[in-house]
Each structure stands twice: as C-alpha cells, then as structure tokens.
C-alpha cells in the first residue's frame, strides 16, 4: 500500500518543505530564495546511502546542476515564475515489507507514466520507519512549454497509477472503504509508525469488537489500553491524555501572563477547552488552524500585544475576605 501526497514549490504562497520531511512553512518566498530552496532540495535528494539501498534516478536531466537545468527549461519557455516545481512523496506501508529496490522501481515507473516529457528526480529514502520516495518534477513540459497543472484530479490520477503499480508488484492498495483513505497526511504518516492516537483508537476498537462480548468486558479491555470510557446508549471513548494536563497547562499559562506583565505587555487568556466554535469544537478548529499534532488538546490561547490602557491594581479593600477560609471551610 502506498500513500501519495504533494507540495507545490512556489515563489509566493505558503510552502511545504521538500527537504526530506516536507514541513509546512506559512510564509512567502521571493523567487531567488525559492530557487535556492529547490536547489537544496534536489541536492538533498541526491544524497543517498547506497549501502542501505537508497538511490536516486534522474529522468530527462543529469548531474551536476539539475536545478540549473530546470531553470533553463523554464526560462526558455518564459515560465520561470509562479510554481517552479512540484514535490510528490510516495510512502509505503511497512506491513508490505517493501524493499528499497522495489520501492525505487515503482517510483521511477510512476514518474515515467505520469510525467513523460518532464524533468524528474526520484529519490528513495529509508530514514524513517518505512520506505518512501520523493519525486520532484520541473513545472514545465520539455516539448510543449506548458506547465503541469496540479489539482485534485491530477493527484487522483497519480494515486490511481500508484495503486496499479502496487497491485502489479503484489502490494496492497488503499481501498475505498479503507480506514486510512479519508484521514489527513500527518495522521496517516503517524499511523504507519503506530504513533497516531486516532489510528490506534480505531485499531483498539476493532479488537474490542472482536474480543468483547459484554459491556463490562468492553470497559475492562479499553481501560487496560489506557482509555477512559463513558458507556451510555452508545460507546463513548476518549484518549486519556494524562491526569494533570489541565492543571499543568493552567500553571504554565499563569506564568506566561506574569512574564508578559514583567515586560509591560498586555495579555489575555482565551479559553478553548470545552467551548464550541462555528462548526466544530473550539479545540478542533484551533488544532486544525495551528497544525497541532495528534494526541494533544488545547486548553487556552494567550494573546499578547501592546497595552491599550493601563488598569489600576487591586487594593486590599477590593477583596472579599469572606471567601477566605482557615483550617477548614
């Protein structure tokens, strides 16, 4: 089973880092900086550990300066602007036990079938728990000068071709009803390594359905797996994130507020936990907006900025000492 994802390498728009791990950066890059970024990405892809089975293949281009070859083609067709390249990655399920050789063959064949008249670099890496390919494609067609149009349809076509190659080589594919099909890339990648609480929860629930014959057995099984279970008309299960995470978060937030005051900054606690947003819970909306990884919950946000006004401090007479109790309530 292989999962296909992509990132467009642009001169202006939010970027996804193509160097090994594709980490998103929410900032625009000028063209020259973007070209340097692409050059570094291509250089990284050519740095492989052949003793481990890693390798790189170039199609319609050659070392030593592939980035310059890419640029010359774009300039020749007056297309050296906007999206200058595309980065696709092909991750294989470790349960398929794919060898680096086979993964590389599949990656190269995929590139040949999908980008026959483009300059392409395919690199196979095994620096994670699973074998994966990086495929960087110059944005301009060598014959027509037209740019590759990357959208949901083209990505779907690439995924379909990847599935065909997997089947041809005796590997599994992501089926229509597969539990991995509709999850986001970050969750899928964590799931491959057994580190996604969402995927682990699905797995544990599947096992519970197979093995538990009663309500008590279900609760006992999930409790043993470190879940907290509330059983009503339907099964409601949540991941136990730790006994004191709310207290810890509140204490840390209090220190941030105190530090802000020390630097004469205004600060405001915005509560998130157990609040409802416009469409989802506030926690879900904030985690999606900020890219918070699986397994974390958001207690609050703290807004910082210049003070619009200086409020007076509290005097002793402002406090209700009737709420203070000594020795006992």
Image (spheres, grey):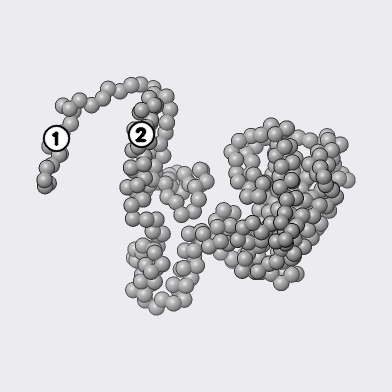
**Which residue in the structure is indicated by mark 1?**
321
Residue 225 appears at what percent x and percent y?
A: 41, 67
Q: Is residue 155 visible?
A: no
Q: Secondary structure at mark 2?
A: helix
**Looking at the image, which is closer to me, 98 or 116?**
98
Q: Nearer the viewer, mark 2 or mark 1?
A: 2
Seen from the viewer's position, the closer of residues 275 and 104 is 104
Is 305 positioned to the left or the right of 86 in the image?
left
- Residue lying at 66% horizontally and 59% vertically, measured from the top left: 126
Vertical comparison of 267 with 214: above or below:
above
Q: What is the quadrant of residue 112 in the picture?
A: bottom right
Label 2 with label 1: CB-CB less than 8 Å: no
Q: Quadrant of the N terminus?
A: bottom right
- Residue 89 at x, y percent in the picture: 68, 54
User: Residue sitting at 63 percent across and 50 percent down?
Assistant: 21
Question: What residue is at 58 percent from the left and 62 percent from the top?
Answer: 192
Q: In the drawing, does residue 234 fall left or right of residue 138?
A: left
Cα separation between marks 2 and 1: 24 Å
Q: Is residue 2 left or right of residue 141?
A: left
Front-most of residues 251 and 79: 251
Residue 266 position within the rendered picture, expressed as x and y whole percent measured from the top left: 38, 27
Q: Position of residue 203 (x, y in %)?
A: 50, 67
Q: Quadrant of residue 252?
A: top left
Query: Label 1: how many residues lie within 10 Å, few (<14), some (14-19) or many (20+)?
Result: few
Q: Nearer the viewer, residue 183 or 119?
A: 119
Residue 147's tag is none
Could you tell me if residue 186 is visible in this image? yes
Determine whether 68 is above or below 47 in the image: above
Residue at 73%, 37% in the rendered image: 35
Task: Give the residue number, with chain letter if any, for mark 2.
Answer: 257
Q: Secondary structure at mark 1?
A: helix
């Amino acid at each position: 089973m292989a999962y296909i994802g992509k990132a467009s390498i642009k001169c202006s728009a939010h970027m996804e880092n193509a160097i090994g791990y594709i980490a998103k950066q929410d900032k625009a890059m000028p063209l020259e900086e973007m070209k340097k970024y692409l050059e570094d990405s291509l250089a990284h892809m050519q740095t492989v550990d052949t003793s481990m089975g890693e390798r790189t293949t170039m199609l319609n281009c050659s070392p030593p300066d592939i980035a310059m070859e890419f640029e010359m083609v774009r300039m020749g067709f007056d297309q050296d602007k906007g999206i200058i390249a595309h980065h696709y990655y092909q991750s294989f399920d470790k349960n398929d036990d794919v060898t680096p050789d086979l993964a590389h063959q599949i990656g190269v064949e995929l590139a040949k079938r999908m980008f026959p008249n483009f300059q392409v670099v395919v690199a196979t890496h095994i620096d994670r728990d699973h074998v994966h390919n990086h495929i960087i494609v110059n944005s301009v067609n060598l014959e027509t000068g037209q740019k590759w149009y990357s959208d949901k349809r083209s990505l779907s076509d690439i995924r379909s071709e990847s599935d065909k190659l997997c089947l041809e080589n005796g590997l599994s594919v992501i089926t229509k009803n597969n539990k991995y099909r509709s999850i986001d890339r970050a969750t899928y990648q964590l799931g491959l390594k057994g580190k996604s609480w969402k995927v682990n929860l699905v797995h544990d629930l599947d096992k519970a359905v197979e093995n538990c014959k009663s309500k008590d057995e279900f609760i006992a099984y999930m409790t043993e797996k470190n879940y907290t279970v509330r059983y009503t008309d339907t099964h409601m299960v949540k991941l136990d994130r730790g006994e004191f995470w709310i207290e810890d978060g509140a204490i840390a937030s209090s220190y941030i507020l105190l530090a802000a005051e020390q630097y004469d900054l205004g600060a405001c606690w915005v509560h998130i936990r157990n609040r409802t947003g416009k469409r989802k819970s506030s926690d879900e909306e904030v985690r999606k907006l900020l890219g918070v990884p699986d397994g974390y919950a958001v207690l609050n946000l703290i807004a910082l900025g210049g003070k619009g006004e200086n409020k007076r401090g509290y005097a002793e007479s402002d406090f209700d000492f009737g709420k203070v109790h000594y020795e006992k309530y």
